[in-house]
Amino acid sequence: MTLIVTLFFTIFPILFFLFLRKRERSLTRLPPGSLGIPFIGQSFSLLRAMKVNKAEKWLDQRVEKYGPISKLSLFGSPTVFINGPVANKFIFTADSTMISNQQTASLRMILGDRILHELSGDDHKRVRSALMLFLKPESLKQYIGKMDNEFRNHLQMHWEGKDQVTVLPLMKMLTFNIICSLLFGLERGLEKEKLVNLFQEMINGMWSIPVNLPFTRYNRSLRASTQVKNLVRKLVCQKRLELALNGAPSNQDLITSLLSVRDENNKEAISENEIVHNVMLIMVAGYDTSSIVITFIMRLMASNNTVYKAILQEQEAVRMNKSLEEVLSWDDLAKMKHTWRVALEIMRTIPPIIGGFRKALKDMEYGGYLIPKGWQIFWATHRTHMDNNIFEEPTKFEPSRFENQSSIPPYCYIPFGGGARICPGYEFARIEILVAIHYLVTRYAWELCSTDNSYRRDPMPMPAQGLPVKLIPKKVL
Ligand code: HEM
Ligand SMILES: *[C@@H]1O[C@H](CO)[C@@H](O)[C@H](O)[C@H]1NC(C)=O
Ligand SMILES: *[C@@H]1O[C@H](CO)[C@@H](O)[C@H](O)[C@H]1NC(C)=O
Ligand SMILES: *[C@@H]1O[C@H](CO)[C@@H](O)[C@H](O)[C@H]1NC(C)=O
Ligand SMILES: *[C@@H]1O[C@H](CO)[C@@H](O)[C@H](O)[C@H]1NC(C)=O
């Protein structure tokens, strides 16, 4: 342990500065800004800002101080922060020999090195298209009924007869159940309860500083991740056996779907590590994001009557034509246009993912500055979404902005990223969010218990206290 501590405070800083000295000597200049304390850099400062919902302000202040392009050090790597539509295009359309994806070192260690984020070129295409077989709209259509059932079960178990509920944890539980059911065919039970807790522990360390000492968040998260991986690996073996015995069932789960992809020699085209790591990635990506959007829509509906009435009207019109038992269909979802616009506007004003990282594979120039080989590039949604050249009166909540989606120029609305790595879960998220809002507004009215309208990021946005609400059940016809 003393050895590790010594390493941190002597060897690393020295290497870091030698590395920088070498860079400074090159012809093009580095962007302005300071790299802060070696290794730690501005990580704590950003994480602290997120906790008190000042992350957006933190980024604004950087831009005020240093201009649109600046250097800093985040989560263990020297980083260049760039933003705006031009920067977004530069990042999202870059050749994969110039810029590769890079999540924080913590994320890579926790989920695994074969996650989609870490793959590039042909590997990225191969694994991504295998995932898309499952995530494309034509496949997801057949799962709407399953999601619908999960949702009704959830309401019955956790909402019925309650005077008060806390929305965010319940929505997380719901999306987790949907993921377990659709991804692994894992239904309710003890094994899943165990998985939920491990999983939350794992997620908690994902944006942490990668210091592996026994008391750190990162260390706890790694331990949990090992256990989750073992569980998923067991499921993969089980599904492989089932596949060999029965052939592929028509209603495949994600694991079976990935196991069924074959190369020209009829061997499995996706390796076991690729399956395990990407299943974990999908769990994380699908669990923490849609639940947040649903929660913020709930909060908004309680405080803005215009929004509430418009959504209610649209959803009641859909319900009116159906019997109580009848599940929602693809066509029903297509009718929920206004509800989806509200969701899009929520993701503009409170993007679930505040930004992401890439890695420069070569020295490159951007906006007159050098981005040195090996550095991180940090992109952020917020500065683009709040740009009044793109969105008039950006702080105003206005779902009608999305009435004509082609009026929004490319790389200007980026809650799902863009380019070759644009979020493949868009359709999945859309279905989850629409189904959830449908049942919530047609069965309940609710009032906020707290007047505290703030939220914080950890790194996902969370409303104060997880949004406790008082329920007023409606008569279900
Ligand atoms: C409201 C919900 C969601 C939002 C806002 C969201 C946003 C994003 C963003 C910003 C990225 C990063 C793009 C980049 O780095 O360039 C991403 C990637 C990804 N998302 Fe989502 N996501 C959502 C839901 C989902 C769901 C439900 C799933 C899966 C079922 C999913 C799976 C993924 C995967 C696998 C990637 C990596 C793609 C790649 O590297 O090629 N996401 N998402
Ligand atoms: C957590 O930290 C302890 C002590 O440094 C180490 O022995 C252990 O391997 C770490 N756990 C993981 C999962 O890396
Ligand atoms: C409520 O939402 C509508 C858009 O549907 C918007 O025009 C209005 O400004 C919002 N009200 C408040 C108080 O935010
Ligand atoms: C409900 O059914 C009526 C008559 O079949 C149809 O005109 C109307 O468009 C339907 N509404 C919705 C929202 O499906
Ligand atoms: C939508 O916006 C595009 C681009 O601004 C415009 O060309 C098109 O006419 C608009 N469509 C409608 C129906 O308003």
Image (cartoon, rainbow, N blue to C red):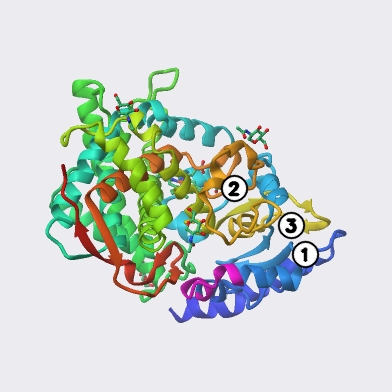
32 vs 59, nearest the viewer? 59
Q: Is residue 141 above or below residue 153?
A: above
- Left or right for 408, reference 477: right
Which residue was labeled with disc 3?
372
Q: Which secondary structure, mark 3? A: loop
Residue that badge 1 annotates:
31
241 up-or-down from 458: above or below: above
Q: Give the range drawn in magenta.
A: 48-57
Type of amino acid under label 2: Tyr
Comparing labels 3 and 1, the label whose residue is closer to the camera: 1
Q: Which image quadrant for residue 186?
A: top left
Q: Residue 413 carries which label?
A: 2
Q: Where is residue 443 in the image (x, y as percent from the top left)?
A: 22, 49
Looking at the image, is mark 3 or mark 2 earlier in the sequence?
3
Quick check: can you spot residue 130? yes
Q: Tell me the SS state at disc 2.
A: loop
